[in-house]
Image: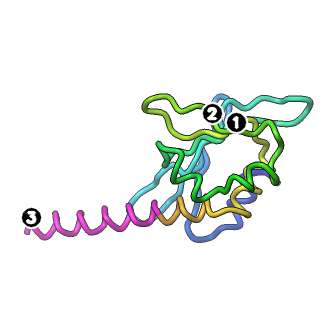
Amino acid sequence: MPLRDYFAKKKNPKFDFKILKQGVTVRCILDNTENTVFKFISCKYVDGILKGTLYLSRFKELEPVEKLISDEFLVYELPQDVDYLPLQKGDNVQLANLTVENIIKIFEKTNLLKGTIQELKRIDGMIYRNRNKLTEGLK
């Protein structure tokens, strides 16, 4: 199933796709913000299968991701060549060698997507409250 079809089934929140040179950016559209949920980058065909890197735009450290995706899931549910890329200073967490099917499996069987959306909704709410305070202050 293509990623666009998977996210089209999700009605709340809505998602938007931006095609990149070698991948796609998936954005979550909320009331006050549109934030990147993840990117599927560095895509190429390997033996006729599209593979790439899942770039987790909301996570700069591995620990919160490991709370959402268990080690057991990575070891037993995904191919052996899937692994986290080493974090460089300023990088976001990235999982390499994933297929679209692997990404959908991660989103369906772990709390990664749910946790990311919860965080984006929290940020969206903060922006709403701050905007209201600013508006009230200008009156």
| CA distance for labels 1 and 3 | 48 Å
Amino acid on which disc 2 is placed: Leu
Q: Secondary structure at mark 1?
A: strand
Residue 17 lies, in percent from the top left, at 61, 48
Determine the secondary structure under disc 2: loop
Which region is colored magenta?
119-139
Residue ID for mark 3 = 138
Disc 2: which residue = 85
Q: Main secondary structure of the magenta part?
A: helix
Asked if residue 122 lies in the magenta stretch, the reply is yes
Q: Taking 65 as reference, is 98 left or right?
A: right
In the image, residue 56 lies at what x, y percent? 56, 45
Residue type pointed to by label 3: Leu
Q: Which residue is drawn at the image coordinates 53% and 62% (left, top)? A: 117
Query: Where's residue 5, x and y in %?
Result: 75, 57
In this rendered view, identify the residue nearer to me: 133 or 108: 108
Sequence-wise, the earlier of marks 2 and 1 is: 2
Density class for disc 1 (Cα within 10 Å; few <14, some 14-19, many ≥20) is some
